[in-house]
Amino acid sequence: MFQYYNMNQVVLPLDLEIKLKENDIAFHIHHLIEQIPDEAFEAFLRDTGRPSYHPRMMMKIILCAYSQSVFSGRKIEALLQDSVRMMWLAQGYEPSYRTINRFRVHPEVQELLRQCFVQFRCQLVKEKLIDDEAIFIDGTKIEANANKFTFVWRKAVEKYSAALVEKSNQMYDELLEKEIIPEIERENLVELSIQELAEVVEKLDEKVEEYDKKIEASEDVNERKQLRSERKVPKQYRKQFQDFVERKQKYQNDMKFRRT
C-alpha cells in the first residue's frame, strides 16, 4: 500500500516557515538582517518610478545563496523558484537575475555585505554554532571602514579580545613550563602585545629549525621518528600564536574604527 498521492488535487498553500528545521540557516540570516538599522537602507529609497524590492529582502536572499556557495545571479534566481528557505526569505517575490545583480553591485550594498559577514560570524559564535577560534579564509582582504554601516557589536569584539588575551597568556605559560622557549621581556604582564606575540612566533620558529637540523643530521630511523614527534608540539604552538597575532591586530583595528 502507498501513501495517498494525487497531482490533480488542489493543495492549499502553507506557510513555508513550518517546512524549515528549527536550526535552519535561513532563520539566522533573517535575524541578522533584521538587526540592521533602518538608516542603513535610506540610500535605496526612491521617490519616483516603480516601487523596488525591499533591500532587507534582497540582502537576505543574497546572503542565503552565498551561504550555499551560490554566487551566480541566474542561479540565485533559480533558487527563488525551488528552494523552500529562499521562498520563505523572499516571501513569494522572485526578482530576476538582472535585478539581483544590479542590487549587489551597488556601492552601499558592497560595504553592507562586508559588515554583515563580520556580524554574522559574531552571531554564530554567540549562539555557539561555531568555535570562537574558527577562521574562514577565501583570499578576500576586507578593510574596516568607520561609516554608518559599522554596526558590528562592540561588546562582541571586546569579549573575543579578552578571550584571546586569556588564551594567549595561558599558552605562553605552558611554553615556559615545558621549557619549549625561553622567557621574553614583557612590558605588560597582563597581556601580550602584538610585538610580543610575534616574538613568541620567532622563538618557536627557532625551536622548529633546531628539530629540523637534528632530524637532518641523524641517521638513526627511530631517533628521526622521535624527533619528528617532538617537533609537532612547537609547530602546533607556532600555528596558534600566528593566529593570535592576526586576530589581535584585527580586534585592535575594529576597536580603533569604532572609537572614531
Image (cartoon, rainbow, N blue to C red):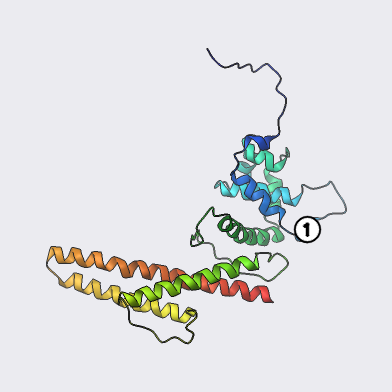
Residue 95 in view (yes/no): no
Q: Nearer the viewer, residue 210 or 137?
A: 210
Image height of 127 relative to 240, above or below: above
SS for callout 1: helix
Image height of 42 relative to 79, above or below: below
- Percent across and percent down for residue 142 are 58, 66
Q: Nearer the viewer, residue 223 or 158?
A: 158
- Percent across and percent down for residue 48 are 87, 51
> Is 33 situated left or right of 46 in this image?
left
Residue type (three-letter) at the residue carrying disc 1: Asp
Q: Nearer the viewer, residue 54 or 256?
A: 256
Circle 1 Cα neighbour tier, 10 Å, few/some/many (<14 / 14–19 / ≥20): few
Q: Residue furthest top?
A: 1
> Is 234 situated left or right of 94 in this image?
left
Q: Which residue is mark 1?
A: 38
Q: Quadrant of the C terminus?
A: bottom right
- Percent across and percent down for residue 80 are 66, 39
For the point 69% across and 58% down, which residue is it? 109
Q: Nearer the viewer, residue 77 or 136?
A: 136
For the point 78% across and 58% down, which residue is it? 38
Q: Residue furthest right?
A: 47
